[in-house]
Amino acid sequence: MINFAEQNHSLEKCPALVLNADYRPLSYYPLSLWNWQDSVKSVFLDRVTIVSSYDRLIRSPSFNMKLPSVIALKNFIIPQTNPNFTRFNVFLRDRFTCQYCGSGEELTFDHLLPRSKGGQTNWDNVVTACSDCNVKKGGRLIQHCGMTLNHEPFQPSTEDLHKNGKNFPPNFLHKSWIDYLYWDVELEA
Ligand SMILES: [Zn+2]
C-alpha cells in the first residue's frame, strides 16, 4: 500500500535513522540520521542492513528500491562516551529549565564565572538560565546577587543525556524509528 503523504514528501525530508550493529542508534544527540543519498549508497556498498523502509520507491533505469527509513551498520562502531559540548546538550543536561528559577521560558546560557572574569565556556561553567535571571545576574557571581543555583553544572555522560532526552524527543520522528529509540523505556517501566 502506498502512503500518499509520504509519497509526496520531498526526498530531503526522508532521512534514515542509523543504528549501530547492536541495533541501538549510532548516536542520540544529535540523532544519527543520514540523508537519503548516503543511506542508499551505503546499501549498495553493502555496509548496512535495511531494517525498515519508507512507503516510497526510488527508481533509476537499473533498479527500484524502497527508500530506507532505518538502517543498521554491519560493523560495530564503539560509541562515544562523552557527548559533545553543544547548546542543545547543555539544555538537555539541564532539562530545558533555568538553573536559577526553574522557568522553561526564553532560555539562554549563563557563565557561572562570567567571561569578563575569565570564565570558560565548558560543561563546568555554563548553565541554562532564563533571560530574566541572566539579566539579573549580569556579569556578577551568584553569591553577589542573592541568587541560588539549583544544580551544579557537570560533564554529563551519554547515558545522562539519554535519560533526559526521553522527555524531549526530536520534533520529527518517523514511526519506523520509535522501536529503536525508545525500546529501553519499556524495560525500565
Ligand atoms: Zn530563571
Image: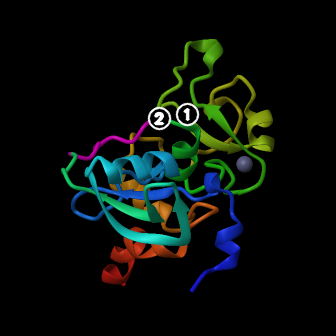
The magenta segment: 78-84
Q: Could you tell me which residue is drawn at 75 percent across and 42 percent down?
A: 133
Q: Quadrant of the N terminus?
A: bottom right
Q: Is residue 88 left or right of residue 16?
A: right
Q: Position of residue 26 (x, y in %)?
A: 34, 52
Q: Could you tell me which residue is drawn at 81 percent across and 43 percent down?
A: 132
**Cα distance, mark 2 to mark 1?**
10 Å
Q: Position of residue 14 (x, y in %)?
A: 58, 59
Q: Quadrant of the C terminus?
A: bottom left
Which of marks 1 and 2 precedes in the sequence? 2
Q: Position of residue 186 (x, y in %)?
A: 37, 83
Magenta stretch prevailing secondary structure:
loop
- Element type at mark 1: strand
- Can you say whether 38 is above or below 68 in the image? above
Say which quarter of the image contains residue 170: bottom right
Q: Amino acid at mark 1?
A: Val
Can you tell which mark lies on residue 85? 2
Q: Nearer the viewer, residue 75 or 167?
A: 75
Q: Position of residue 33 (x, y in %)?
A: 47, 52
Can you tell which mark lies on residue 126? 1
The answer to whether residue 86 of the structure is visible from this angle is yes
The answer to whether residue 68 of the structure is visible from this angle is no
Can you tell which mark lies on residue 62? none
Q: Could you tell me which residue is drawn at 29 percent across and 46 percent down?
A: 45
Q: Nearer the viewer, residue 103 or 8?
A: 8
